[in-house]
Image (tube, rainbow, N blue to C red):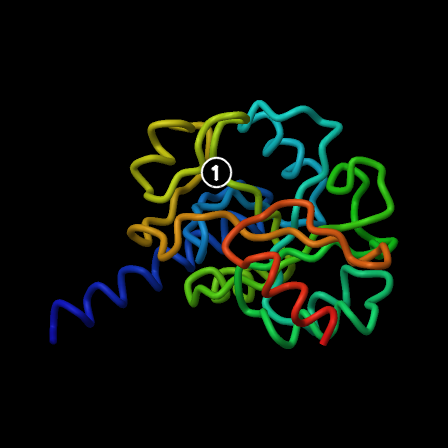
Amino acid sequence: MGDSVGMYEDILAELARAADVLKNGGVVAFPTDTVYGLGARADNPAAVRRIFEIKERPLGQALPLLVSDAAQALSVAGDVSEVAQRLMVHFWPGALTLVMPCASWVPEVVTAGGSTIAVRVPAHLLTLHLIKAAGGPLIGTSANVHGRPSPVTAEEVWEQLGGRVDLVVNGGHTPDGVESTIVDVTVDPPRILRQGMITSEDIKSIIEG
């Protein structure tokens, strides 16, 4: 019992440190329900640019956001369609990323100058705690060097990114290890851009239902 309490207190302390790093413009790697993510405050363009440098990712590629709930998703999306709302209700929190029209406040470096934003509510208590503690939506791209496999442990993050990040939150092996399914709901009918944890059949059943 004592060991469990100690481990719980340790991870809470680590999350508190991670939230402070994010609030101060840092970049943190953390576990999600799919793979390890690399995050910064979405409203900090300089921190977001560091993510591109760390990942060796081309600047012209948009980055996804992680939010704590559907209400926070409304703050980053300029418009939420009826179909998008149905998908949110059915699959969030979970491994579904929705591409929606972007709110005007989101920095251009996040969207690569586009008019849409990719948003997800992760089904992972540590991630949700971190988003709330950091005070706003976080970049939620995979914590890997561009083109290399997405990490599912903190050790794999260190192997790829080493000392490039300010902090790595060790939350053990991620539950799923498979990236989210991405659906573009700005078109009619919605289009699946990437097949991930959630199948196309599951998506279609909700869209058509």
Provide residue 158's location: percent of width, then percent of height.
Answer: 35, 32
Residue 139, placed above or below residue 120: above
Number of numbered discs present? 1
Q: On the rendered image, what quadrant is the C terminus found in?
A: bottom right
Provide residue 24's location: percent of width, then percent of height.
Answer: 57, 47
- SS of the residue under disc 1: loop
Tell me which residue sits at (47%, 32%) in the image. 144
**Residue type at the position of mark 1:** Ala
Tell me which residue sits at (76%, 60%) in the image. 76
Residue closest to the eye, 115 or 105:
115
Tell me which residue sits at (27%, 60%) in the image. 10
Q: Which residue is mark 1?
A: 143
Provide residue 149's location: percent of width, then percent of height.
Answer: 44, 32
Provide residue 33's location: percent of width, then percent of height.
Answer: 44, 58
Q: Indicate left or right for 196 with 206 as reference.
A: left
Q: On the rendered image, what quadrant is the N terminus found in?
A: bottom left
Q: Indicate left or right for 163 with 187 as reference.
A: left
Dividing the picture into quadrants, the one containing residue 67 is: bottom right
Q: Residues within 10 Å of mark 1 (few under 14, many from 20)?
A: many
Residue closest to the eye, 149 or 13:
149
Residue 141, placed above or below residue 118: above
Tell me which residue sits at (73%, 69%) in the image. 207
Q: Indicate left or right for 41 with 5 as reference.
A: right
